[in-house]
Image (cartoon, grey):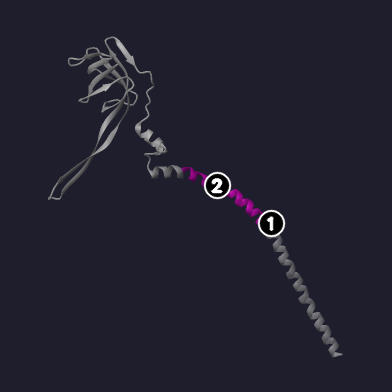
Amino acid sequence: MYAVIKTGGKQYRVQPGDLLVVEKLDGEAGAAVSFGEVLMLGDGEAVTVGAPTVDGASVAATLIETRKGDKVKIFKKIRRQGYRRTRGHRQTETVLRVTGITAGGKETKWDGTVSLTTKAELDARARGLDFATLNVSKKALKAGAATPAAEKPAAKAKAAPKAEAAAEAPAAEAKKPAAKKAAAPKADAGEKKAAAPKKAAAKKDDAAE
């Protein structure tokens, strides 16, 4: 079964399971949408044309996303006047999944499951990109990476006093023996100097004799 519906000033031929892109509609992702303006119904060879719509007929759909369409460029030029203008426009559109058609007590439903994955996410996957960080600025990413790095030096700084205390203890022990060794040679030198005059005196006595 198929139907011709009217929305946004345009007509669309739809059937259960179709992915439909229409002019912007109100609603969030996952919301149910119903179209009551059914202009025509078709079921096999039987065709029902409305006057202007088919009584009791409706089309049910699920809203997937509201996004901006492809960019359209508008270029204007007036020759020999130096006039050139370029403008761009992206029309807002809504993406729907048709889930069923109801007419004359008969209902046709789609057996599939509606996926709310957006086109932008599908494009990011196709290019091997992470959709979660795709629209995040580089400054925000750097700030997020710097926060854990700043916490690690703080932990090391807390442990630093213990390491310094452990390093000071061996240094103090090493200084004490060094002071004793330095004092010993001075005492020996004093004894040698004191003994030297005695020998000199003995030589003078021998010379006097």
Quadrant (top left, top right, bottom left, bottom right) of the N terminus? top left
Quote the CA–CA distance across marks 1 and 2.
26 Å
Viewer-side residue, 58 vs 166: 58
Question: Looking at the image, which residue is at 17% across and 47% down?
Answer: 84
> Which residue is under mark 1?
173
Viewer-side residue, 8 vs 171: 8
Q: Quadrant of residue 28?
A: top left
Residue sticking out furthest to the left: 80
Residue sticking out furthest to the right: 209
Question: Looking at the image, which residue is at 21% across and 42% down?
Answer: 87
Q: Amino acid at mark 2?
A: Lys
Question: Looking at the image, which residue is at 34% across and 21% down?
Answer: 17
Question: Looking at the image, which residue is at 26% across and 22% down?
Answer: 13
Q: Position of residue 157 (x, y in %)?
A: 54, 48
User: Of the numbered discs in the image, which one, if any, rests on residue 156?
Assistant: 2
Q: Residues within 10 Å of mark 1 (few under 14, many from 20)?
A: few
Q: Is residue 61 left or right of residue 151?
A: left
Q: Is residue 204 left or right of residue 170?
A: right
Q: Position of residue 25 (x, y in %)?
A: 26, 26
Q: Is residue 174 left or right of residue 96?
A: right
